[in-house]
Amino acid sequence: MAMDINNGLGPLAQGSGKAAGRVSTEDSRNNRAGENASSSSEDRVEISADATSVGRLAANLESQESFDAERVAEIRTAIENGEYPIDSRRLAEKFLQLESLIYQ
């Protein structure tokens, strides 16, 4: 069974110039009102001290390395030499936590 989805939508669905003319007239009125308001006042943006602090913090974080490459090299060497200590109880607990997240 075919359905006419445009049924009852009137001139907007059919692309009538009359409906489109109404929209453009309203838009032009709104544009003129906006022009008058902007010509009599200035737009300003103020950045709070908190926002400035966040910006400085972000810039500082971008300039730093995201990880300690020296520490990673130390751990890699210890693992390769079999000298890296492994706490089997802690490892098992972490696996249990992971499984509980997976099977929730």
Image (tube, rainbow, N blue to C red):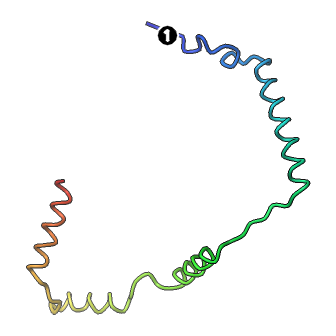
In this picture, residue 32 sits left or right of residue 47: right
The quarter of the image holding the N terminus is top left
Kindly identify the amino acid type of the residue bearing the numbered disc 1.
Answer: Met
Residue 16: x, y in percent?
Answer: 75, 16
Q: Secondary structure at mark 1?
A: loop
Q: Is residue 78 above or below residue 9?
A: below
Q: Residue furthest top?
A: 1
Residue displayed at 17% across by 66% down: 97
Q: Is residue 75 above or below residue 51?
A: below
Residue displayed at 20% across by 59% down: 101
The image quarter containing residue 17 is top right
Front residue of 71/19: it is 19
Q: Is residue 79 above or below residue 32?
A: below
Q: Which residue is mark 1?
A: 3
Residue 65: x, y in percent?
Answer: 47, 84
- Crowd tier of the residue under label 1, counting other residues whose Cα lies within 10 Å: few below 14, some 14–19, many 20 or above: few
Front residue of 39/5: it is 39
Residue 10: x, y in percent?
Answer: 66, 13
In this picture, residue 22 sits left or right of residue 54: right
